[in-house]
Amino acid sequence: MAAEPRFDESIHASTRLRLCAVLRPLDSAEFRVLINILGMSEASLSKTIRILVELGYATTSKQPSPQRDDRRLTTTVQLTPTGKMAFDGHLAAISALADSNQ
């Protein structure tokens, strides 16, 4: 089912758009991996994720890491179905806009 084209101002900010683009094809991604892929600071990525969580577009979970011997937890991020639909609609709106200018 194709998403209805709908420009979403809350996704359009470059850090949110980039994060959604990375997460969209994945089930989830670890926080550390996202930092490396996006080249963002921990603080900036945390803020971006928090905004998407507040919008209902993403969720986070924490679990023990099998690669660590200590008690630190690994944070995992994923888009919600609502977030995927919003991102897909945003891309469809941008695509429609680009197509209308040709």
Image: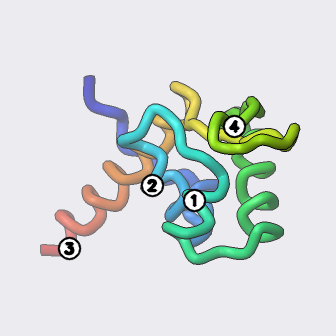
- Across and down, in percent, residue 24 comes to 42, 43
The residue at the point 20 percent across, 73 percent down is 101
Pointer 2 local density, CA inside 10 Å: few below 14, some 14–19, many at least 20: some
Say what amino acid the circle numbered 4 marks. Ser
- Image location of residue 89, percent across then percent down: 41, 42
Q: Foreground residue, 17 or 62?
A: 62
* Earlier residue among tags 4 and 1: 1
Identify residue for label 4: 65
Q: Secondary structure at mark 3?
A: loop
For marks 4 and 3, the one nearer the N-term is 4
Say which label, 3 or 2, has the lower sequence index: 2
Where in the figure is residue 69, as x and y percent of width and height? Answer: 77, 41
Q: Secondary structure at mark 4?
A: loop
Asked if marks 3 and 2 touch (Cβ < 8 Å), the reply is no
**SS under mark 2:** helix
Helix, strand or loop at label 1? It is helix
Measure how far apart labels 4 and 1 are at the Cα level. 16 Å
Q: Is residue 4 above or below residue 37?
A: above
Compare marks 2 and 1 and give the one earlier in the sequence: 2
Q: Mark 4 near mark 3, Cβ–Cβ under 8 Å? A: no
The mark found on residue 101 in the picture is: 3
Q: How many neighbours does mark 4 have within 10 angstroms: few (below 14), some (14-19), or many (20 or more)? A: few
Q: Residue furthest right?
A: 71
Q: Can residue 22 be seen by looking at this rendering?
A: yes
Q: Which residue is mark 1?
A: 34
> Which tag is nearer the camera, tag 2 or tag 1?
1
In this rendering, the answer to whether 57 lies above or below 1 is below
Say which label, 4 or 2, has the lower sequence index. 2
- At x 55%, y 69%, the residue is 36
> Does 93 sit above or below residue 78?
below
Kindly report which numbered mark, 3 or 2, lies closer to the viewer in this rendering.
Answer: 2
